[in-house]
Image (cartoon, rainbow, N blue to C red):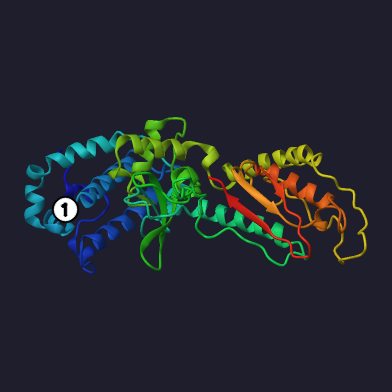
């Protein structure tokens, strides 16, 4: 028998148009269909003893109805068109394309876990969106957070000196060094997502829009998405799994070209990109081991011996400031973070080494900056107790 939109609705136990009485448009009707489908697949799931063939039929019928919705192909703009007596009589003649769609979806034997569907049932609308950035205005939430934390870490490390009375901090916008032709070379803002690049965002439920965009490489794959991947070692199977999440947990993937779809698939099936126990905790364990190695490696660069202050000019305890190491104790994990920057230091920085009028603090501070990639350090001695540390961008 030829499959029709009417019979697909029947597979979801929708046989009467009254089920859509409270709906004002196709969007609301599809939400009703999705709600009914979710309840049905949970009860028919093979993990709970259900019939695999019936489960596949229910899923294939839902995917057909979803395709009609996504392509704005619902007859007369309402699913009720398929539930009238006249529609039921003519359906077999008019729904040949739907029969082909149903056959295609019926061939999918992948069965996501019952837990996947249970989690999906909690969401009324897709909570994640993937797309190609339409402009270069959006910022990556992760890159922005890392940038802000790194800037704060550097500022805090300098501000820890109680004798410092003025600090020239980095401006919100990077500034460049004037070249011989007076042009200013601006440093690229790496937090921005370039136009055309793949970005992934999540729903802001209060606003009903998508935000918190991430570069694809910065996005951690949520457990809800992970649970729907039936065979992560198979890219084609994983693409089918992710496309089946359209209008359920995910949206936008079907609108992307094949290359970008596969880039998204490869990101999702790589366990190193997974949120939770599968990815982040394993990475944290590796980072901790690396951090210990870095600490041991860098420790030799710093002199920890504290010398007493000469003349008692301050009440600062020599060596009271903790030397920062990349990737350890909250410090930015980037040994090239200060690459291309020149630091002009004024003062003796007793917290980082010896006491007043002692060069040990200066040497330790120099070593710390070099550990983060800083170079071309030069010291300026002035009379008085006002110390200024200035960062000048050489890019």
Residue at horizontal 85%, vertical 63%?
316
Report the front residue among 270 and 389.
389
Image x and y of residue 251, in percent: 34, 50
Residue 48 seen by the camera = no
Report the front residue among 209 and 52.
209
Residue at horizontal 30%, vertical 46%?
58
Q: Which residue does the numbered mark 1 point to in the structure image?
A: 74
Question: Secondary structure under badge 1?
Answer: loop
Image x and y of residue 203, in percent: 40, 59
Report the front residue among 304 and 9.
304
Residue at horizontal 28%, vertical 48%?
62
Left or right of 253 on screen, residue 65: left
Q: Quadrant of residue 110?
A: top left
Quadrant containing the N terminus in the rendered view: top left
Image x and y of residue 22, in percent: 23, 69
Q: How many marks?
A: 1
Image x and y of residue 328, in percent: 71, 47
Residue 6 seen by the camera = yes
Residue at horizontal 41%, vertical 58%?
211
Q: Residues within 10 Å of mark 1 (few under 14, many from 20)?
A: some
**Residue furthest toward the front?**
180
Left or right of 218 on screen, residue 284: right
């Amino acid at each position: 028998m030829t499959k029709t939109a009417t019979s697909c609705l029947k597979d979801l136990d929708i046989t009467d148009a009254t089920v859509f009485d409270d709906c004002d448009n196709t969007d609301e009707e599809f939400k009703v269909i999705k709600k009914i489908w979710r309840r049905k697949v949970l009860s028919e799931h093979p993990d709970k003893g259900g019939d695999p063939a019936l489960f596949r039929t229910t899923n294939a019928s839902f995917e057909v109805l979803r395709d009609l919705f996504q392509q704005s192909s619902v007859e007369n703009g309402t699913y009720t068109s398929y539930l009238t007596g006249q529609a039921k009589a003519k359906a077999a003649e008019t729904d040949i394309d739907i029969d082909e769609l149903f056959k295609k979806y019926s061939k999918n034997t992948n069965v996501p876990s019952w837990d996947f569907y249970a989690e999906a049932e909690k969401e009324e609308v897709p909570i994640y969106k993937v797309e190609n950035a339409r402009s270069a205005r959006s910022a990556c939430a992760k890159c922005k957070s890392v940038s802000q934390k790194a800037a704060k870490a550097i500022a805090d490390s300098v501000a820890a000196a109680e004798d410092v009375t003025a600090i020239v901090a980095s401006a919100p916008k990077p500034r460049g060094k004037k070249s011989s032709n007076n042009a200013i070379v601006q440093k690229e803002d790496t937090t921005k997502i370039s136009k055309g690049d793949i970005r992934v965002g999540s729903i802001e439920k209060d606003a009903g829009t998508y935000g918190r965009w991430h570069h694809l490489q910065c996005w951690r794959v949520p457990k809800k998405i992970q649970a729907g991947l039936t065979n992560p070692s198979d890219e084609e199977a994983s693409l089918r799994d992710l496309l089946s999440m359209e209008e359920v947990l995910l949206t936008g993937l079907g609108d992307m070209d094949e290359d970008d779809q596969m880039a998204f698939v490869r990101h999702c099936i790589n366990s190193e990109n997974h949120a939770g126990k599968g990815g982040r905790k394993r990475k944290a364990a590796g980072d901790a081991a690396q951090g210990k190695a870095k600490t041991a490696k860098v420790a030799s660069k710093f002199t920890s011996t504290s010398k007493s202050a000469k003349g008692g000019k301050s009440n600062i305890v020599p060596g009271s400031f903790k030397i920062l190491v990349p990737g350890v104790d909250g410090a930015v994990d980037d040994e090239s973070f200060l690459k291309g920057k020149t630091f002009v230091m004024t003062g003796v920085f007793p917290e980082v080494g010896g006491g007043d009028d002692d060069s040990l603090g200066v040497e330790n501070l120099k070593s710390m900056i070099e550990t983060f990639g800083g170079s071309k350090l030069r010291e300026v001695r002035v009379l008085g107790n006002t110390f200024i540390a200035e960062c000048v961008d050489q890019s």
